[in-house]
Amino acid sequence: MRLKEDNKTANRSLSHKFSAIGLLIAVGIVFGDIGTSPLYVMKAIVGVNAGYSEDYIIGAVSCIIWTLTLQTTVKYVLIALRADNKGEGGILALYSLLKRSCPRWLYIVAALGAGTLIADGVITPAITVTSAIEGIRSFDPSVPTMPIIICIILVVFVVQQFGTGKIGRYFGPFMLVWFLMLGAIGAVNIGLYAGVMNAFNPIYAIRLLVDYPDWFLILGAVFLCTTGAEALYSDLGHCGRMNISISWIFVKAMLILTYLGQGAWLIANKGNDLANVNPFYAVVPHALIVPAVVMATGAAIIASQALISGSFTIFSEAIGLNFWPRLRIKYPSTLKGQLYIPAVNVALCAGCLLTVALFQSSERMEAAYGLAITVTMLMTTVLLVFYLNMRNTPKLLTLLFVVVFTAIEGCFFVANAHKFSHGGWYTLLIGGVVFMVIMIWHSAELIRNRFIEYKRVSDYYPIITDIKDDVAIPKYASNLIYVSHSGRSSMVESKVLYSIINKRPKRADHYWLLHLEITNDPDQLEYDFDTLIPETLFRVNLKIGFRIRPQLSVYLRQIVEDRVRAGKLDLVSTYPSLRRHGVPGDFHFVIIHRIFSPESTCSWKDRTVMRLRDIVRHLGIPDTVAFGLDTSYVTVENVPLIITTHHPRRIRPSADG
């Protein structure tokens, strides 16, 4: 049976349908990050070698063109976009697709990739906004840019709580104009040195990397042109593969034109003092500087918006995969996929402001940028290898994929490794913290699940029936609902039975066992209903996609309405005074909260993980709020979780006893 879904899906259908509108939406949503790279890529390349030659610039532009071709086009557009999980993309969606058929340790790969992707989400808004606003110095160097940057970042994060439903429709047209501007200005400047067109020949890229002793510094700067590729894959669920793939042809053409134009300008101005000159703004006619700054700022805001929304999605998926403590999730609009996580928003905002405060300028941020996202790309490559094997791809093609992209991303990782002491430590620190929280939480959940004791429910049918009929026991509730972790309808946690029978026996008209199953289908919302004891004990298995917020009281109410409407359930109160007036009975939820007991006799490793979990859980919200029960009548029963891996000595009677 399928639960009713309140969210409107028209927007999703429109964006996924291959059409002019779908392409426009893709341009606005997907390519913000990679589309703002021209703001700082060529500046970083010149920063590596201020006394550059023609061959140096042509070789660098050639590296950019072939990086966009191999890394972005081949790996992500042609291969990764096909690795969708019910239409959803991104590293956690890919892991969710693989987890049932691949080695268990893959969760470490997914956790590391997700952590470094979040780190990218912290620094990208800071560097894009800063690079855009620094263009003001092109016509007035005295204008203080820092207050403007901070204000824009604050506004971007403050408006997240209202959603982007109303302004999101303008992202596509704005980014379309942005890319057309990039292409037009780039094409106009190519004439300054037509020889820059040789950059299409990969031999110039190879020659530069072979001949230049500091090749790794060049690759570290070149890599910035493709940092948005992972975000492109993550946005698969918003726009659909065909729309992203087709629109990428246009976006890539515009990006190549702008890089060629900046390269030609740099060669034409070789030997001039270009200190503190950003080639992006240098190629813009002076009369268009102000509009260019405005456009760049708008594109930076849209790119930031996409990464922030992507971070919300990552945390939502992580919660569904038991990678993160449950967080409060809000839905600012009725558009599917629109979600807002206040705690994540505050953390990202603080991280962006700290980034601006620490690095002060886009040039210094460039030194910190790229190292973390190379780790994400390497982890995605590992997962894609398992995906290709799962799809029975010919071994030779899989081997070719492994060799080519491990080599490319390995080189980029080595190239970016030198950035560690220049600021790369900052993004790795953020990614490392997120990774450690994921590892602690997931490992603790595996330990907890291993030591939960289950019993056969049918063995307790007679006593549950007798408790219901025993008027000597005060009625606890008309409908008593327990949230159960058991995936089998025939089994239930021993602590649930203990709560009903032993810990203050609880008489009720109906007992419900409610099990929440997080599924691989991101948008699944279904349930299975089993009657265990007629008119007494029921079990409901909720199948909820990993991107959907659990709202147990809402879903149970819908299920009850279905059963009552079908004449299969009578929910009118059994109290005579209330039944006479047709008043329905009350619902009372009971959540069993297992607290790690110091009496546990387990290994130091398990004990450390469980104690760290007790610290990490404060990042989340209580189960009552997480399950959407904060407005319901709920009792939380704390019980000890005793983990015993070796049994203590048993006391015995003395010889005299």
Image (tube, helix red, strand yellow):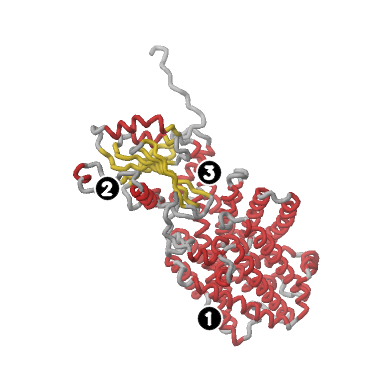
Within 10 angstroms of label 2, few (less than 14), some, or many (20 or more) residues? some
Spatial CA distance of label 1 from label 2 is 68 Å
Q: Residue furthest bottom?
A: 287
Q: Amino acid at mark 3?
A: Ser
Residue that mark 2 sits on: 584
Q: CA distance from mark 1 to mark 3?
A: 51 Å
What amino acid is found at the position of numbered circle 2 in the picture?
Answer: Pro
Tell me what residue is drawn at x 71 percent, y 57 percent: 405
Q: Nearer the viewer, mark 1 or mark 3?
A: 3
Mark 3–mark 2 CB contact (< 8 Å): no
Spot occupied by residue 369 in the image (x, y as percentages of width and height): 61, 64
Q: Position of residue 516 (x, y in %)?
A: 45, 46
Checking the image for residue 443, the label placed there is 3
Dot placed on the residue nearer the N-terminal end, 3 or 2? 3
Q: Secondary structure at mark 3?
A: helix
Identified at 51% across, 49% down, the residue is 519
Of the image marks 1 and 3, the number of the one nearer the N terminus: 1
* Image location of residue 56, percent across then percent down: 76, 72
Q: Which residue is mark 1?
A: 143
In this picture, residue 431 sits left or right of residue 199: left
Is residue 70 left or right of 364 when viewed as pictured?
A: right
How far is mark 3 from mark 2, CA to CA?
Answer: 43 Å
Tell me what residue is drawn at x 24 percent, y 33 percent.
471
Q: Judge the density around disc 3: few (<14), some (14-19), many (≥20) Cα neighbours within 10 Å.
A: some
Disc 1 and disc 3 in contact, CB within 8 angstroms: no
Foreground mark, 1 or 2, reads: 2
